[in-house]
Image: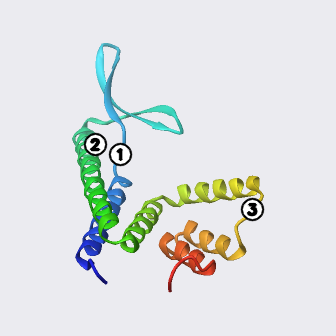
Amino acid sequence: MEYQELYNKYMCLLKDKENCHNKLALLKDGYISTKPISGKKYPYLQYRVDGKLLSEYIKDDSLLQVREELATRAALLEQIKEIDGQLEKLRTAAAILDKSLSRKLITLGRCAIMEVMSLAERGKSLAFSSAMTALEGIPAGEDTEKNLALWARGETSFKESYLNTLRTHHLTEG
């Protein structure tokens, strides 16, 4: 393939971004606040779940670990921003050099976004997708539904599901 180095760099960056997201999934999210109770200050981790602000008491022996996790999370988010900037530069270069390569990179980027979703998020995404296509009156084909269900259960990659659907409708080579 022409421009193999650009393609390889893009793939490496997508993998790095996926690794960052996988690490983020294991870390605490939120911020530390202190609450005064009976004249003494106690640390709490505050975070949101479904838009609701929750607080979790942090024991003294865990405070340093929570702070480290939050700092690691901030560093990973910054790393993802940097990777996104590099990915954008490569997509811009591909768009100038080769339209076919540009389309491949865009497809790979779209698929990579879907890969980092948790199984719960995948289930919600699939349910939303089904509801939207039903509203539009154009339900997905049986093969597409099967491919997406496999992805939602973590049994196949989104890329494979997506490419199978494109192949079924003769929208891609191979």
Kindly identify the residue that appears in the image at 26 percent across and 56 percent down.
83
Which residue is disc 3 drawn over?
138
Mark 1 lies on residue: 28
User: Position of 98 compared to 149: left or right?
Assistant: left
Asked whether residue 97 is in view, the answer is: yes
Estimate the x, y position of residue 80 in percent, counting from the top left: 29, 53
Residue nearest the viewer, comparing 144 with 126: 144
Q: Measured from the top left, where is residue 6 in percent x and y?
A: 25, 72
Q: CA distance from mark 3 to mark 1?
A: 40 Å
Residue 148 is labelled as none
The image quadrant that residue 133 belongs to is bottom right
Which residue is denoted by mark 2 in the rendering?
A: 70
Count of labels in the image: 3
The reply to whether residue 155 is visible in this rendering is no
Question: Disc 3 to disc 2, how far (Cα)?
Answer: 44 Å
| In this view, 14 is above or below 88 | below
Of callouts 1 and 2, which one flags the residue occurring earlier in the amino acid sequence? Answer: 1
Dot 1 alpha-carbon crowd within 10 angstroms: few under 14, some 14 to 19, many 20 or more = some
Q: Earlier in the sequence, mark 3 or mark 2?
A: 2
Secondary structure type for disc 3: loop
- Residue type at the position of mark 1: Lys
Q: Residue at x 25, y 58 (%)?
A: 86
**SS assignment at label 2:** helix
Q: Is residue 2 above or below residue 52?
A: below
Mark 1–mark 2 Cα distance, whole angstroms, equals 6 Å
Where residue 21 sits: x, y (%)? 35, 57
- State which tag comes first along the sequence, 3 or 1: 1
The residue at 69%/59% (across/down) is 130
The nearer-to-camera label among 3 and 2 is: 3
The answer to whether marks 1 and 2 mark residues whose Cβ atoms lie closer than 8 Å is yes
Specify the quadrant of the image occupied by residue 152.
Answer: bottom right
